[in-house]
Image (cartoon, rainbow, N blue to C red):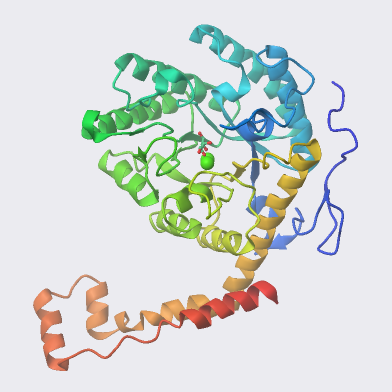
């Protein structure tokens, strides 16, 4: 097929001094950080839906970008043109993975059997491209939120018929993920939540979501899916309240339903901030529970209260993210750019420049997080802050041996405790600045 992005060749690393908009300034795939090349630390992925499907339509206006790639929307020819465009794009930008929803790949038919036939056809075509390019699938998922049938959710729908339809989609999406060798399978509970408690049986809905997930695990394992299942938390939008509010809520849900051995978390930056947390907070919660699996690498806008899915440019946030990832020993998943160019950035060049921005931001984050760990002052301060638990009564508390009476006796003997040492937050923030900007 003919080259689509003519005039744009392979994007290369030119270094921080480069002024070439179509070159990396910081992402140097082969550069070694902590004993591994950057490309291994940063398995970047393209989100099929944003990059190849989203044309900038919003509530107030039509599409600004042309994502027809030379064919008529709603046809299999268009589906194939998206595959061609996607693989040319990923090769040129040096991305080795992609993520997809079922209905990103083909136009949905009236009859699910026909949709599934189309999915078989397109994934045959994708497999050929994957073989010839070495590009892989990071994760797959089913879109169980766009079609009107999912107005009340999928697993949490009040309709058993809708539940079955969702199950059929999950079954097929799992088969496709296995066929394409995906590392993971994501559940983002798009409409798994509620608008009002007046009409909602919250307990039953949550139990049904868990039942759908259990079915997916059983089926996935039976067809040879060896990867991780992921929950992607998000507190709101489109629903007023979504059940997987944040990392802590999702982990509690998984444990309560005996799903925590099969699932990890896919943490999206913009969703963490919508929940009133920092990105790092939700990564930390996942990490300390041994459940940090994958990342949707994007950025929200703190002046807007919704999910803006911007390409990440905040190096401070990316540094704190990579600090958590390095401390976690890497990801079993990867870094999916679940991000879209702003509506007025509608050209092919903008698509490339957006990925260059995101990849450079995370490369800087990796370099700076490694420097922060090597510098050691932040980690040493935090460790020292808990030194009172290293000996005496502190050590007995930490090992679980101390009793309430013993602690009370200690307190009575001392009459009143000394103030804990200074938290030195401002000093630590200046350490981070000196690492970032030296
Ligand atoms: C939407 C979500 C979605 C998931 C995949 O806000 O980010 O795109 O990542 O269904
Ligand atoms: Ca996402
Ligand atoms: Ca999002």
Q: Quadrant of the C terminus?
A: bottom right
Q: Relative to the observer, which residue lies in front, 98 or 129? A: 98
Which residue is painted at 69% across and 23% down in the image?
Answer: 126
Question: In the image shown, does 124 or 92 lie closer to the viewer?
Answer: 92
Give residue 327's position: percent from left, percent from top. 51, 62
Q: Position of residue 178 (x, y in %)?
A: 54, 26
* Residue at (41, 22) in percent of width and height: 150
Side (left or right) of 188 relative to 45: left
Q: Residue furthest left?
A: 405
* In this view, 313 is above or below 309: below
- Foreground of the two, 436 or 259: 436
Q: How many marks?
A: 0
The answer to whether 311 appears left or right of 157 in the picture is right
Residue visible at 33% across and 33% down in the picture = 195
**Residue 166 as seen in the image, left or right of residue 5:** left
- The location of residue 114, given as percent across then percent down, is 55, 7
Q: Quadrant of residue 318?
A: bottom right
Residue placed furthest toward the right: 7
Residue nearest the viewer, comparing 415 with 348: 348
């Amino acid at each position: 097929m003919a080259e689509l992005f003519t005039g744009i060749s392979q994007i290369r690393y030119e270094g921080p001094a480069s002024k070439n908009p179509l070159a990396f300034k910081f992402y140097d795939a082969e550069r070694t950080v902590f004993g591994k090349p950057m490309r291994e630390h940063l398995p970047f992925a393209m989100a099929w839906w944003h990059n190849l499907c989203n044309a900038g339509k919003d509530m107030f206006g039509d599409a600004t970008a042309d994502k027809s790639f030379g064919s008529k929307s709603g046809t299999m020819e268009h589906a194939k043109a998206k595959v061609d465009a996607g693989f040319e794009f990923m090769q040129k930008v040096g991305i080795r993975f992609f993520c997809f929803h079922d209905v990103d790949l083909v136009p949905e038919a009236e009859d699910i059997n026909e949709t599934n036939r189309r999915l078989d056809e397109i994934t045959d075509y994708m497999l050929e491209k994957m073989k010839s390019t070495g590009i892989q699938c990071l994760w797959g998922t089913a879109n169980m939120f766009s079609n009107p049938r999912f107005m009340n959710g999928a697993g949490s729908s009040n309709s058993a018929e809708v539940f079955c339809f969702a199950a059929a989609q999950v079954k097929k999406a799992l088969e496709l993920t296995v066929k394409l060798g995906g590392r993971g399978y994501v559940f983002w509970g798009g409409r798994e939540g509620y608008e009002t408690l007046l009409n909602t049986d919250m307990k039953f809905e949550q139990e049904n979501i868990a039942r759908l997930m259990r079915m997916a695990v059983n089926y996935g394992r039976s067809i040879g899916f060896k990867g991780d299942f992921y929950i992607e938390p998000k507190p709101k939008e489109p629903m007023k309240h979504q059940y997987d509010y944040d990392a802590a809520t999702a982990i509690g849900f998984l444990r309560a339903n005996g799903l925590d051995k099969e699932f990890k978390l896919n943490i999206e930056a913009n969703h963490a901030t919508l929940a009133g947390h920092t990105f790092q907070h939700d990564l930390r919660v996942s990490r300390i529970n041994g459940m940090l699996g994958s990342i949707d690498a994007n950025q929200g806008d703190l002046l807007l209260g919704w999910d803006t899915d911007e390409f990440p440019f905040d190096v401070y946030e990316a540094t704190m993210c990579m600090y958590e990832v390095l401390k976690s020993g890497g990801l079993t998943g990867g870094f999916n750019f679940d991000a879209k160019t702003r509506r007025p950035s509608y050209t092919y060049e903008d698509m490339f420049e957006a990925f260059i921005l995101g990849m450079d931001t995370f490369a800087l984050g990796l370099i700076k997080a490694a420097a922060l760990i090597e510098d050691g002052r932040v980690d040493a301060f935090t460790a020292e802050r808990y030194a009172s638990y290293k000996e005496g009564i502190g050590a007995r508390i930490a090992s679980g041996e101390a009793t309430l009476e013993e602690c009370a006796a200690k307190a009575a003997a001392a009459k009143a405790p000394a103030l804990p040492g200074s938290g030195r937050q401002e000093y630590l923030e200046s350490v981070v600045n000196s690492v970032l900007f030296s």
